[in-house]
Image (cartoon, helix red, strand yellow):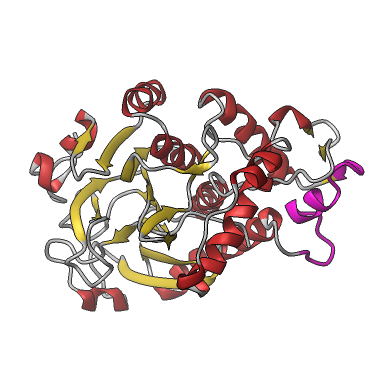
Amino acid sequence: MIVRKISCIILLVVILGVSAADAGGCSLSGHYGKYEADFADLFDTVTTIVGYAKGKAEFDRYANIIYDRMKELDQLYDIYNAYDGINNLYTVNQNAGVAPVKVDRDIIDLLLFAKNGYDLTGGVINIAMGSVLSIWHSYREAGIADEESAELPPMDMLEQAAKLTDINDLIVDDVNNTVFLRKSGMSLDVGAVAKGYAAGEAAKAAKSAGLISALIDAGGQVVSIGKPMDNVRERWGVGIQNPDLSVDGVQNISDTIYVNDNVISCSGDYQRFYIVNGETYCHIIDRATLMPARLYKQVVIICPDSVTADLLSTALFIMPYEEGAALAAKMGAEVLWQFADGTQKATEGYIRISKNLGNYSSTDSTD
């Protein structure tokens, strides 16, 4: 599977007057009932769907649409496995320096977005970093398996791999739908954008089929559709994990934010990491240093577009605060930064819809 960001957002489905018993599908707003589905076999995470529909059969149809679309994209963006009859990113990587590979349009669109994201972030997000990221992945997995023998990759190994990360050596032909990595040894890793793209596309497919009220939590990439149809809440409530506490029930929620038709994406240093000589090293690698980013414990992004939110959450986790704030303003995103020293900063738009910072609640007006 693709190396992806691990969840650092916890979905809150019990907010102000809606009990856990409602999840069985009781009628709330008119003929709408509340239902829930989850699946754990895509994008190395658990995906949870909470939504309102006019019966379980209707909800199940939407859930199946979401699952099928995400499964399709999970296979296309996989960099570790081949699938019969599919040219995916594993196929592209295997043909580095050999020949262009004809691929599905969903791969072309994601890669073009990511190449634009490279320019947008000044190279901070570079999907051609696969050669470097694969080294870190191997050392991290070995360190997790045997903590006493955990070690950092040698810098000379990382620097040698970094010679194969020039984004200009990624050739995307959007007329003939082919992808070519010009240098042997190059590889793509789309972990900074793939899950966001997939969750957004799955939400679009379900909305086109008629879904009007749901939260899709793809392991922390939370897409909200409409508002809860319970005659109580005006917005969905989503809990933000406290990066200083382990995952242990509701105590690890540091804030709740309230959204409609928006996406929340988060990058953190506390769920995919390993320890070397008492120091913690996260999975998000700074291209400039070839080392894990260390400025923040967590960055939370809110914006309307799912793949953009995914891109920005990784980029701003690496960028210094001033640069990240400028990029967020340019993209119209709201942000919470939680710094390594425990302090935090947030944009005005984030504060306005925050329970802790803005005294907001799910029953407040959307105005």
Task: Inspect the magenta stretch and tell me whether residue 334 lies in it.
Answer: no
Question: Could you tell me which quadrant the N terminus lies in?
Answer: bottom right
Q: Position of residue 310 (x, y in %)?
A: 47, 43
Q: What residue appears at the point 22 percent right and 75 percent down from the top-left corner?
A: 20
- The magenta-colored residue range is 82-101
Q: Quadrant of residue 329?
A: top left
> Is 317 above or below relative to 9?
above
Q: Position of residue 167 (x, y in %)?
A: 69, 31
* 86 relative position to 215: left or right: right
Residue at image position (68%, 60%) is: 75
> Does 152 sit left or right of 34 as displayed?
right
Instruction: Tell which of 31 and 274 is nearer to you.
Output: 274
| Vertical position of residue 169 compared to residue 187: above or below | above
Quarter of the figure with residue 229: bottom left
| Residue plotted at (52% across, 60% down) | 151
Decide whether the magenta segment is chiefly helix, strand or loop.
loop
Whether 17 is drawn above or below 108: the answer is below
> Camera-side residue: 267 or 270?
270
Q: Determine which quarter of the picture holds residue 303.
A: top left
Please provide percent x and percent y for residue 339. Answer: 26, 41
